[in-house]
Image (cartoon, rainbow, N blue to C red):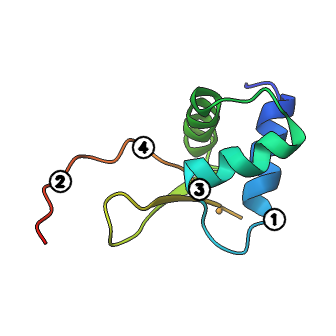
Amino acid sequence: MQRNTRQKSAILHAIEHARRPLSPQEILAEASQAVSQIGMATIYRNLKSLVDDGALKVVTLPCSTCMRARATSTTWPRKASASSATN
């Protein structure tokens, strides 16, 4: 059982109150308004934990660099695999 931290609460709040799936960078921007000393590693660690617990699911958009998180009632990300893109 994972403990509920201020960081995890801020991350969940950001995701649950969004009207669309959020990228890890967007989650960081929102969560840092509530918890000033939160970093990207904390975002990814908590997103993985929330996905593993079933609280979030990964949403993959057509663009491989466009991973988003959505709460499972909605999200989260596994590392996107590198893909070669041609223009």
Image-quadrant location for residue 4: top right
Mark 3 or 1 closer to N-term?
1
Residue at image point 59% right, 56% down: 75
Outermost front residue: 87
Answer few, some or many: residues within 10 Å of disc 2's Cα (few below 14, many 20 plus, some between 14 and 19): few
Horizontal side, residue 86 vs residue 62: left or right: left
Question: Could you say which is closer to the camera, residue 73 or residue 46?
Answer: 46
Residue drawn 59% across and 33% down? 40
What residue is pinned by disc 3? Answer: 75
**Residue behind mark 4:** 78
Residue 85, given in percent of the width and then of the height, sits at 15, 62
Amino acid type, residue under disc 4 in the picture: Arg
Q: CA distance from mark 3 to mark 2?
A: 22 Å
Residue kind at label 2, given as amino acid type: Ser
Q: Is residue 28 left or right of residue 4?
A: left
| Residue carrying label 1 | 17
Q: Residue 21, percent across and down? A: 60, 66
Q: Which residue is mark 2?
A: 83
* Labelled pair 4, 3 in contact (Cβ < 8 Å): no
**Which residue: 72% across, 64% down?**
73
How far, Cα to Cα, is label 2 from label 4? 15 Å
**Where's residue 28, x and y in %?**
68, 44
* Distance CA(mark 4)–CA(mark 1): 22 Å
* Mark pair 1, 2: CA separation: 31 Å
Residue at left 64%, top 28%?
A: 42
Pointer 4 or 1: first along the chain: 1
- Label 4 sits on a secondary structure element that is loop
